[in-house]
Image: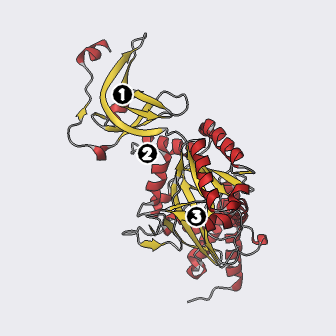
Amino acid sequence: MTRTSPDRAKRAEELRQQIRFHDHCYHVLASPLISDAEYDLLVRELLALESAHPELMTPDSPTRRVGGEPAERFTKVRHPAAILSLSNAFSADDVRAWHERIARLDERVSAARFVVEAKLDGLTVVLHYRDGVFELGATRGDGEVGEDITPNLRTVRVLPLRIPIDPKRGKAPRRLVVRGEALIYKQAFLDLNARLAEAGQKTYINPRNAASGALRQLDPALTAARPISLACYSIVEADGTPPATQWDTLSYLRDLGFPVAEGATRCASLDEAIAVSLSAREHRDSFPFEADGMVIKLDDLVVARELGVVGKDPRGAVAFKFPAEEVTTVLQDIGVNVGRTGVITPYAILEPVEVGGVTVRQATLHNFDFIRERDIRIGDRVMIKRAGEVIPYVMAAIPEARGGAEKAYRMPGCLLAFG
């Protein structure tokens, strides 16, 4: 076998560093420094080098983002520490009750600061790095054991394959395990569904389902075709001394090159943290991603850690949940409205359900093509959504919940004649 010259090896490493840097600028910072054509030239040069000299390929090469061979199944991965859930609060009084409980356990809580972050509605992932190179990624699973989805995560453009992105920022810890949320931003989700519908393919109900489904594909090439993003927010395990506060943790992760969700706020008091959360609830529709609440965390991670857990919930943080915008209920019947211009519009008659803070009994079904294309049947359990002041609407049926008594909808003959 021909030996690789030092010049080729050096050039390959230079290209990898440049491509990683420009990936970060484009996908994470949204501030590209070169044109797409210039970027493509860098990638093509690296691909050519690696194709001619396979020994130059490295685990963190950007060329590996396209996906590898399909897997037969996912293997199990035990997390280095429990990946815990959060207890929920549904009102300011609930949040204050949480604070009072933990203040009785540790007097330091009374003078604590807080960090408020969006509770991202995606798929939790656990990312392992060794000597700065991404080596393993897993789902949360049951909190103790998850599934190895490393090949799929490699295809996510915003995930750094090597840290730090900027070598001038020093070295990464020898071992670092980070927790984050894989998600699809709202606009990217709308664009994805539009492309799928145009191609005659099945669309997704919501961004979370789309992200989760894409990351759990056995073929990484299918994952690569989805616009998955990532937001990291905590360190599960690290060599050395990690940041002592949550606020510094977010800054540290950002400096290493991890994408971090915008909008986190450091608060001097619990009242301020509650006010920030309530304000966010009023403006949730302006978020670029789906969020089902705000997370209020003790900024002091030492205090948070020493408070321990209750059940499977860490005491040092609480999820202040928004009123649900998406719920399921039973479609009892389908009615029709006839407009002044003669347009006939179907609507769903629902088993009453609370969504977005109000009780909903009816929801729009858009049009009759929507009912037929989505195979929505009377008696189905359906997903409905109400966002802000928008009229509630049926998103989709849930075929897995069918028991056999559901009936396909047929427009009455008198309405056909009317049309």
- Please state which of residues 129 and 110 is positioned toward the viewer in this rendering: 110
Label 2 crowding class (10 Å Cα cut-off): few <14, some 14-19, many 20+?
A: some
Task: Kindly identify the amino acid type of the residue bearing the numbered disc 2.
Answer: Tyr
The residue lying at 47 percent from left, 69 percent from top is: 68
The answer for how far apart the CA atoms under marks 2 and 3 are is 25 Å
Q: Which residue is mark 3?
A: 179
Q: Secondary structure at mark 3?
A: strand
Q: Secondary structure at mark 1?
A: strand
Task: Kindly identify the amino acid type of the residue bearing the numbered disc 1.
Answer: Ala
- Residue 271 lies left or right of residue 321; in this view the side is right
Residue 200's tag is none
The answer for how far apart the CA atoms under marks 2 and 1 are is 20 Å
Picture layout, residue 328 above or below residue 358: below
Task: Kindly identify the amino acid type of the residue bearing the numbered disc 3.
Answer: Arg
On the question of residue 366 being in view, the answer is no
Where residue 92 sits: x, y (%)?
60, 42
- Residue 319 lies left or right of residue 378; in this view the side is right
